[in-house]
Image (cartoon, rainbow, N blue to C red):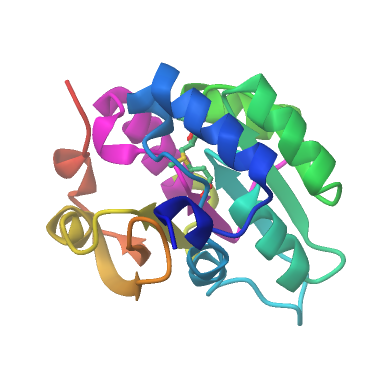
């Protein structure tokens, strides 16, 4: 089985992802959308038993978004933010339950305000956090601190364990969920409670 056939979305999405990866490698950060197993691992905090406000960053073609929509309570609010308009079009078509916004996450507070959201329960982060500027990651973490004090921050990765120290410096509680069934193998850091000194440990490039 070739690495590309491991992941589940239909072929046009895989091809689109590959093309975008060739053109914007650092921003897309993966040559294929997340597998269903990795997408499911991102859904640990999603519950069908009560409405939640769920924010997804770097939603791509909707691999994670569609799993979230499958599990969540019918009255949950799912906002998916993606910088690439072509990805966003696929995403909105594939997951009509989600509200899709084409935006750079550096404008996250403004996006949430324009959507009328003053709090959220879960932040599902599909962004290539280590290769984003620190200033962008700071906006994301600040927004999480202000609008989701008791919430969960779930970070997708395709480099298992490598960034665990990064998240342990930021959060009081960090659990890593390894996912072998993805090309390449990856996982999710499920994090809670930002540490008081988190601002000194913001990841990213200068
Ligand atoms: C590793 S891919 C993850 C895609 C999808 N969540 C998945 O699991 O298949 C990272 C995504 O983040 C998006 N992205 C990168 N920088 C961004 C930014 N500054 N604002 C919003 N989206 C961004 C990319 O376009 C890409 O779709």
Residue at 53% in and 74% down: 44
- Determine whether 175 is above or below 193 in the image: below
The picture places residue 42, in percent across and down from the top left corner, at 51, 65
Q: Quarter of the image holding residue 201?
A: top left
Q: Quarter of the image holding residue 182?
A: bottom left
Residue at 71% in and 64% down: 52
Can I make out residue 172 in this image? yes
The picture places residue 121, in percent across and down from the top left corner, at 60, 61
Viewer-proximal residue among 109 and 89: 89
* Relative to 35, 140 lies left or right: left
* Relative to 191, 88 lies left or right: right
Q: Quarter of the image holding residue 74?
A: bottom right
Viewer-proximal residue among 143 and 82: 82
Residue at 71% in and 42% down: 117
The picture places residue 129, in percent across and down from the top left corner, at 32, 39
Image quarter (top left, top right, bottom left or bottom right) of the C terminus: top left
Can I make out residue 72 in this image? no
- Is residue 39 a member of the stretch shown in magenta? no
Residue at 61% in and 49% down: 55
Image quarter (top left, top right, bottom left or bottom right) of the N terminus: bottom left
Magenta stretch, residue numbers: 117-145
């Amino acid at each position: 089985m070739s690495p590309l056939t491991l992941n589940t979305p239909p072929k046009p999405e895989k091809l689109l992802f590959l093309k975008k990866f060739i053109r914007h490698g650092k921003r897309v950060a993966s040559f294929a959308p997340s597998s269903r197993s990795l997408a499911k691992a991102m859904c640990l905090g999603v519950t069908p038993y009560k409405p939640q406000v769920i924010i997804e960053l770097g939603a791509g073609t909707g691999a994670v978004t569609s799993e979230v929509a499958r599990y969540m309570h019918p009255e949950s609010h799912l906002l998916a933010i993606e910088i690439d308009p072509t990805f966003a079009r696929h995403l909105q078509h594939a997951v009509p339950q989600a509200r899709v916004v084409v935006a750079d996450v550096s404008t996250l507070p403004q996006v949430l305000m324009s959507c009328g959201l003053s709090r959220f329960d879960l932040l599902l982060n599909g962004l290539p956090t280590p290769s984003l500027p620190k200033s962008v990651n700071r906006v994301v973490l600040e927004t999480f601190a202000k609008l989701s004090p008791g919430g969960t921050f779930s970070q997708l990765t395709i480099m298992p364990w490598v960034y665990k120290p990064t998240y342990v410096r930021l959060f009081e509680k960090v659990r890593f969920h390894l996912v072998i069934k993805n090309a390449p193998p990856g996982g999710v850091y499920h994090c809670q409670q930002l540490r008081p000194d988190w601002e000194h440990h913001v990841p990213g490039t200068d």
